Image (spheres, rainbow, N blue to C red):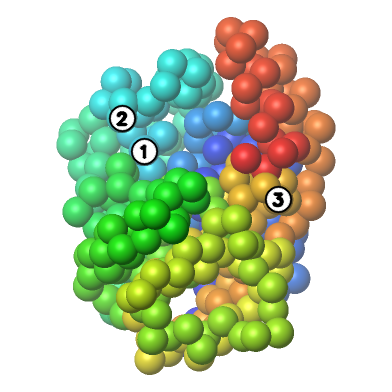
C-alpha cells in the first residue's frame, strides 16, 4: 500500500504548513491527503489553499470552507465568522478556491467533505454529518461520571465508518478511536496524553503524546485523526500530521515559528478581540 501523508486543519497558518511540508518531504510519501479546513482562523488562507493544491492529491472541504463559501450555515461564533468573512475576501479569484466555492454554493458540501476509497474513509468530521460532527468523547470532566454514555456515543461514531480504516479532522487533536479489544495496539512503553485519552468498557479514544508510532492496524477497525497543522488543541503548540501505510500510523510533531503567525494575525483588519483570541491560543496549543 502507498505511504500517505495526512494533513488537516491548516487554518491559514502558512508557517506551520511549510514546516510540515518540509518534514513530509523527509519521509518521501507516495501521496498527500488534506482533510479540510485549510482556511479560517489564520492570516494566510489564500497562500495555504494554493499551496495545498500544489502538493495534495485529495483535498476535502471542511466546515470553514463551507462557512467561507456560504456564510451563516455553520453556526460559528462571531470571531470565527469574522475570520471566515475576511478569508472569503482574501480568497477571491484564486482558481482552485473558486471551483470549490462554486460547488459548495451548489450544495455539494457532503460530496466534498467525504470520500471512500477501498478500505479507507476520508472525511472532515464524521460520516452522515461530514462538516459538523466531531469524532470526540466530549469534555474530559465528564469522562468518569458519564463514562458509559460517552462510551456508547463512541461505539456509534465508530459504527458510522463503513470501512475498516477511517480518517477525520475537525477536532484539532491527534487520536485513534477503536474498540477496547484492540487495546494491545497501544504499547506499554509509550506514554500518552492523559488529559484527553478516554477509556470506556467498549472503546478507546487514544491521544498520543508527541511523535508516536502505532502499528498492527491492518486487521483492526480504527478511526484516526492526524491532528491540526495550523491550530493544535492538545496543549502542544507544534504542528501535527500523520504518516500511514495501511498497517502503521506515525503521528509527527513539527515546531514552527509561532510568533510569525501571531504577528500576521495581529495585523489583520478584524476586531481587536478576534485578533487577540486567535493569536494568543497558538502558543498554548489550545
- Reply above or below: 264 against 258: above
Q: Position of 14 compared to 33: left or right? A: right
Report the residue at 71% width, 84% height from top: 189
**Going from the N terminus, do you reach mark 1 or mark 3 first?**
1
Report the residue at 62% width, 62% height from top: 194
Q: Position of 85 compared to 25: left or right? A: left
Mark 2–mark 1 contact, CB under 8 Å? yes
Q: Which quadrant is home to the C terminus? A: top right
Which image quadrant for residue 204? bottom left
- Give the residue furthest to the front: 145
Mark nearest the camera among 1 and 3 is: 3
**Going from the N terminus, do you reach mark 3 or mark 2 first?**
2
**Going from the N terminus, do you reach mark 2 or mark 1 first?**
1
Query: Dot 2 lies on which element?
Result: loop
Which percent across, then down, holds residue 186?
56, 82
Residue annotated with mark 3: 236
Q: Which class describes the residues within 10 Å of circle 2: few (<14), some (14-19), or many (20+)? A: some
Q: Position of 45 compared to 161: left or right? A: right
Query: Dot 3 lies on which element?
Result: loop
Query: Dot 1 lies on which element?
Result: helix
Give the Cα distance between marks 3 and 2: 27 Å
Residue annotated with mark 2: 74
Which percent across, then down, holds residue 234?
62, 50
Which percent across, then down, holds residue 73?
26, 26
Decide which of 266, 18 is in the foreground and name it. Answer: 266
Q: Which class describes the residues within 10 Å of circle 3: few (<14), some (14-19), or many (20+)? A: some
- Reply above or below: 159 against 129: below
Regarding residue 123, the answer to whether it shows in the image is no
Which percent across, then down, holds residue 124?
37, 52
Residue annotated with mark 1: 63
Amino acid at each position: 500500500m502507498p505511504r500517505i501523508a495526512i494533513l488537516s486543519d491548516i487554518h491559514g497558518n502558512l508557517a506551520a504548513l511549510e514546516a510540515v511540508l518540509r518534514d513530509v518531504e523527509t519521509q518521501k510519501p507516495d501521496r498527500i491527503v488534506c482533510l479540510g479546513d485549510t482556511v479560517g482562523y489564520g492570516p494566510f488562507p489564500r497562500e495555504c489553499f494554493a499551496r495545498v493544491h500544489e502538493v495534495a492529491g485529495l483535498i476535502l472541504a471542511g466546515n470553514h470552507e463551507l462557512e467561507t463559501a456560504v456564510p451563516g450555515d455553520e453556526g460559528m461564533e462571531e470571531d470565527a465568522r469574522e475570520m471566515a468573512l475576511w478569508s472569503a475576501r482574501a480568497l477571491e479569484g484564486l482558481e482552485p478556491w473558486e471551483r470549490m466555492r462554486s460547488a459548495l454554493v451548489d450544495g455539494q458540501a457532503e460530496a466534498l467533505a467525504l470520500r471512500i476509497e477501498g478500505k479507507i474513509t476520508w472525511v472532515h468530521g464524521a460520516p452522515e454529518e461530514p462538516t459538523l460532527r466531531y469524532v470526540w468523547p466530549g469534555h474530559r470532566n465528564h469522562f468518569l461520571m458519564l463514562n458509559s454514555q460517552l462510551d456508547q456515543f463512541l461505539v456509534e461514531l465508530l459504527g458510522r465508518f463503513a470501512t475498516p480504516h477511517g480518517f477525520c479532522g475537525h477536532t484539532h487533536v491527534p487520536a485513534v478511536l477503536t474498540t477496547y479489544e484492540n487495546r494491545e495496539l497501544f504499547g506499554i512503553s509509550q506514554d500518552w496524553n492523559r488529559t484527553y485519552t478516554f477509556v470506556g468498557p467498549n472503546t478507546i479514544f487514544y491521544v498520543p503524546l508527541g511523535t508516536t508510532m502505532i502499528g498492527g492496524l491492518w486487521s483492526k477497525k480504527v478511526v484516526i485523526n492526524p491532528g491540526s497543522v495550523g491550530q493544535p488543541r492538545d496543549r502542544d503548540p507544534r504542528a501535527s500530521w500523520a504518516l500511514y501505510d495501511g498497517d502503521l500510523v506515525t503521528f509527527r510533531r513539527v515546531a514552527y515559528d509561532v510568533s510569525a503567525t501571531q504577528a500576521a494575525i495581529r495585523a489583520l483588519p478584524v476586531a481587536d478581540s478576534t485578533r487577540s483570541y486567535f493569536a494568543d491560543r497558538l502558543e498554548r496549543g489550545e
